[in-house]
Amino acid sequence: MKEIRAIVRPSRLNRLRDALRAIPNFPGVTLFRAEGFTAPAAVDKRSVRDELTDFSPKLMVSVLAQAEMVETIRQAIIQACQTGQIGDGLVWVVDIDETHRIRDGSAV
């Protein structure tokens, strides 16, 4: 089992939802509201507003899926959320050793 995590722009949420729902047997998604900023050296500050407003709203996406689904989900996230601009976000994959349903304690 793997966890696919991503930090994305909130404005891309509808596109992301539609892309993930289109994946056969998609297992589900959890969203977290987040704030962040990119590496300061990667951004050329353009205004006083940018200087005073370091943090921008983002969403963290978390999907638990079987290993064979990871590439499909990763590609769906990238395609749905990519604008080509700094701040589009990141996607990463984490190994999950165990998962258990809270409802009955059974292993997933």
Image: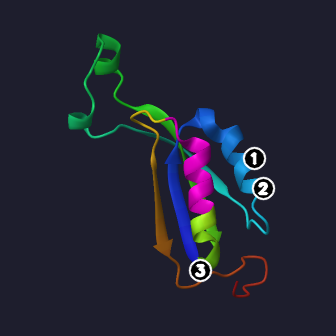
Residue lying at 69% horizontally and 41% vertically, measured from the top left: 15
Q: Is residue 98 above or below residue 13?
A: below
Circle 1: element type: helix
> How far apart are the two marked residues, 1 and 2, measured between alpha carbons?
6 Å
Q: Earlier in the sequence, mark 2 or mark 3?
A: 3
Q: Where are the magenta residues, as a range? A: 73-83
36, 18: nearer the viewer: 18
| Labels 1 & 2 near each other (Cβ < 8 A) | yes
Q: Position of residue 89 (x, y in %)?
A: 45, 45
Say if the magenta span includes residue 82: yes
Q: Quadrant of residue 28?
A: bottom right
Q: Is residue 46 above or below residue 8?
A: above
* Res. 39 visible in picture: yes
The C terminus sits in image quarter: bottom right
| Label 2 crowd bin: few (<14), some (14–19), many (20+), radius 10 Å | few
Q: Which residue is mark 2?
A: 22
Q: Which residue is mark 3?
A: 1
34, 73: nearer the viewer: 73
The residue mark sitting in front, 2 or 3, is: 2
Q: Position of residue 18 (x, y in %)?
A: 75, 47
| Labels 1 & 3 near each other (Cβ < 8 A) | no
Q: Is residue 106 above or below residue 14?
A: below
